[in-house]
Every structure is written in C-alpha cells, then in structure tokens.
Image: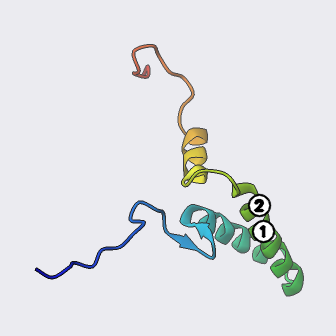
Amino acid sequence: MQPVKTYSHLDKKEKMLGIEVMDFLLLAVVYAFVFVVSRNIFINIAIVVAVYFALRWYKRGKPQGYTATLVRFLLTPKYYTLSGREKS
C-alpha cells in the first residue's frame, strides 16, 4: 500500500498578500475609490498601502472570517423574535 499525499491546514481560509479574500475585496474597493477621486499616483498608492497595513494591524488577534462575519452581522435585519423567526 502506497502512502497518499494529504494537505495540512485544509480548514484554513485562503489568503492573498497576508489578508483574507474579504479583506482583499475591501482593499480593492478602496483602491478603486481612491483612483477615481484623485489623480496623483503617489498619494493614491500611499493611501492604499496605509489601508493595507491598517487592516493587517486591525485583524491581528482576530479569528479567521472576522470581516465576513462582521459584514454579515451589519447587513442582516436586527429584529429577532423569541422563536427565532422574523416577522414579515
């Protein structure tokens, strides 16, 4: 019987540039907004890099999927009933 190659950390989230995909999408939105508003390339790159490092600093010590969970919490309705069903 031959050993089968397995991959460790199958439960970990994908990361790009050291941040999760949701954070990378947030960084892409900031990138698009900054480049639409301003035409100075050096200031734009500095702002995007500052947001990247701010995200890395903010996410330190937080669990995986924190940003996606926070966005989901903020976008869901806030009216809950005792039975767990929302009123229509």
Query: In this picture, is 13 found above or below 42?
Result: above
Residue 77 coordinates in the image, percent (x, y): 54, 31
Residue located 53% across and 37% down the image: 76
Image colouring:
rainbow
Q: Are marks 1 and 2 in contact (CB under 8 Å)?
A: yes
Q: Mark 1 points at which residue?
A: 53
Picture quarter with the C terminus: top left
Q: In which quarter of the image is residue 24?
A: bottom right
Residue type at mark 1? Phe
Q: Is residue 36 above or below residue 86?
A: below
Side (left or right) of 30 relative to 18: right
Q: Is residue 71 above or below residue 42?
A: above
From what the image shows, is residue 32 above or below residue 86? below
Image quadrant assignment for residue 57:
bottom right
Residue furthest left in the image? 1
Q: Residue at x 79, y 75 (%)?
A: 49
Q: Which of 3 and 43 is in front in this view?
A: 3
Percent coordinates x, y for residue 4 in the rendering: 22, 78
**For mark 2, what is the residue?**
57
Local secondary structure at mark 2 = helix
Q: Residue at x 70, y 73 (%)?
A: 32
Between 68 and 86, the one lying in front of the other is 68
Q: What's the residue at 68%, 53% (across, down)? A: 61
Picture quadrant where residue 72 is located: top right
